[in-house]
Image: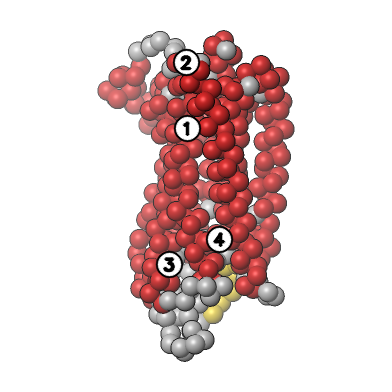
Amino acid sequence: MSSTALADTTLDENTYNYYLYDYAYKPCTKEGVKAFGELFLPPLYFLVFLFGLLGNAMVVLVLCKYKRLKSMTDVYLLNLALSDLLFVFSLPFWAYYAADQWVFGLGLCKIVSWMYLVGFYSDIFFIMLMSIDRYLAIVHAVFSLRARTLTYGVITSLVTWSVAVLASLPGLIFSTSYTEHNHTYCKTSYSLNSTAWKVLSSLEINVLGLVIPLGIMLFCYSSIIRTLKHCKNEKKTKAVKMIFTVVVLSLGFWTPYNIVLFLETLVELQVLQDCALERHLDYALQATETLAFVHCCLNPVIYFFLGEKFRKYIIQLFKTCRGPFALCQYCGFLQLYSADTPSSSYTQSTVDHDLHEAL
């Protein structure tokens, strides 16, 4: 099992030691799970941190330097990149914690756990908002001219961040650092009604982080597909292709983790009582959580390879940079994409004006 805040909402401090069944009084040893995490999680966390930081920082630079936040979609893209950055900033702490123990004190334990959760919730919330944005642009074209403005984009973004912060408050309040058997932990600890709080936290993660966003996105995209069947338009299709890819990958990388968290809740409630199953769930939690972490690196890659204008902005950014990146202008990879091409391909952040013309 990973040592991150979300995982701690479902497992107690004895995860890596043993769980004593009331009916059998036999220990369920999980030392192998802890050893596996100590070996594989730190390098994986570091790689995700490195690529997530680099990729999302580029997205922020491109949006601020070239796009200058002219539309609602640009605002959502910027906030999505910022939520990914907030998320990856917590990973170096969890990497060290997985390898050794928590040495950063109580204050950072609370702050890092809170950052992790805020990044998690805001990421899925902004992907949901981007789906709604595409739904309005294509299904309700006339209404979208009034609704999809920069001002409304800023307002909805502030509301979204507020909801993410409020949803993450339990991680800030209940996270604590303590020492047990000469080992320091940073985990969620509920003094009263521990089982009830853990179940509620797991339900919150699954409902706010999966069920509600999934339902809204399925509705948006089913409506978009029906609309496009009656109105073929290359510009619309390419815009939908980009956001659809982002949404599908987001759900594909996060859903397995939510499912494992739900199964861990059943273990907490003693609905599932099998030592071998618990060990398998702990390994699955480590694997699916790491898979979910990789997601924060994917959006910049999608924008680069599927978005022609975004790719050109990235290349232009490299060419105007000083220092080591200045050498990249001589790379064949950049030269391959440096030629001007027709402007009929669009990223999420460049489709707004063209969608209005197409409609």
Question: In front: 304, or 270?
Answer: 270
Q: Position of residue 315 (x, y in %)?
A: 40, 23
Q: Which residue is mark 2?
A: 232
Question: For the residues marked 3 and 4, what is the alpha-carbon distance in whole angstroms?
Answer: 15 Å
Q: Quadrant of residue 268?
A: bottom right
- Dot 2: few (<14), some (14–19), or many (≥20) neighbours within 10 Å? few
Mark in front: 3 vs 4: 3
For the point 69% across and 63% down, the residue is 173
Mark in front: 3 vs 2: 2
Mark 4 or 2, nearer chain start: 4
Q: Which residue is mark 4?
A: 5
Mark in front: 4 vs 1: 1
Q: Position of residue 46 (x, y in %)?
A: 41, 52
Q: Amino acid at mark 1?
A: Phe
81 to 1, vertically: above or below: above
Question: In front: 216, or 354?
Answer: 216
Mark 4 or 1, nearer chain start: 4
Mark 3 or 2, nearer chain start: 2
Mark 3 or 4, nearer chain start: 4
Q: Amino acid at mark 4?
A: Ala
Q: Which residue is mark 3?
A: 282
Mark 3 or 1, nearer chain start: 1
The N terminus sits in image quarter: bottom left
Q: Amino acid at mark 3?
A: Asp
For the point 69% across and 31% down, the residue is 154
Question: In front: 271, or 357?
Answer: 271
Asked whether disc 4 touches disc 1, contact meaning CB atoms under 8 Å apart, the reply is no
Give the side of residue 201 with respect to residue 233, left or right: right
Direction bottom: furthest residue: 25
Q: Which mark is residue 244?
A: 1
